Amino acid sequence: MSSYQHTQTGYVIIIALLTGILIDLAVAYWAFAAGALTAPSIAIVSFVVAVLFLSLLIFSTLTVAVDTAYLRISFGPVYLIGRKWLLAEIAKNSWWYGWGIHLTPHGILYNVSGFDAAEIRTAKGRVFRVGTDEPEQLAQAINAAISGASQSR
C-alpha cells in the first residue's frame, strides 16, 4: 500500500506533441490535395504520427509513489516506463530544479513539468532526481517511510 502517490501532468509536453501531430497531418493533407502523396511518404507520415502519439502516451504524466519499501516512478497512464528504488538505499534528499528525462551533472532526471525535483542519493552513491509539483509532500512521504523502515529493523 502506498503512503504517498501523486501524478503530475506535463501540459507543455502534451501541447508540443499534439502540435507536432497536427502539423504532420496538415502537411500530409496538403500533399494529398496537391497529388504529391506517395506510398513512401504515407509510410513516413504514419511513422512520425505513431512515434509522436506513443511519446504523448508515455510522457504526458509522471506518477511518483512512496510505500513502506520503495520510491517508485512511472511515466504514462500505464506502467510503460518506470523505476523503483529501495528506501533503505536512500541516504539524503536535496531539492533542485529541472525537467525532462535526461542525464544531468547531478544524475538522471525524471520529470514531465515544472522546476521542482527531489535529488536522491542512495547509500551506494547513485544519484537521480524525481520531478514533482508537490516537493514538500514527497519529502515528507520519503522521510516518513525511511524512518518507519529503519525503526522496523
Image (cartoon, rainbow, N blue to C red):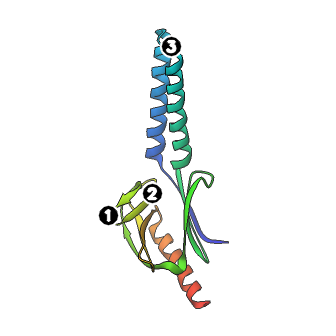
Residue found farthest to the top: 35
Q: Is residue 89 above or below residue 134?
A: below
Q: Quadrant of the N terminus?
A: bottom right
Q: Residues within 10 Å of mark 2 (few under 14, many from 20)?
A: many
Mark 1 residue element:
loop
Three-letter amino acid code at disc 2?
Asn
Q: Which residue is mark 3?
A: 32
Three-letter amino acid code at disc 3?
Phe
In the image, residue 106 lies at what x, y percent?
34, 66
Three-letter amino acid code at disc 1?
Pro
Q: Which residue is mark 1?
A: 105
Q: Residue at 46% x, 11% y: name it.
A: 36
Q: Residue at 62% x, 89% y: name it.
A: 152
Asked whether residue 62 appears in the rendered view, the answer is yes
Q: Quadrant of the C terminus?
A: bottom right
Q: Quadrant of residue 69?
A: bottom right
Asked whether residue 60 appears in the rendered view, the answer is no
Q: Could you tell which of marks 3 and 1 lies nearer the N-terminus? A: 3
Q: Quadrant of residue 83?
A: bottom right
In three-dimensional space, the C-alpha distance between marks 3 and 1, rounded to whole angstroms, equals 46 Å
The one of 152 and 36 positioned closer to us in this rendering: 36
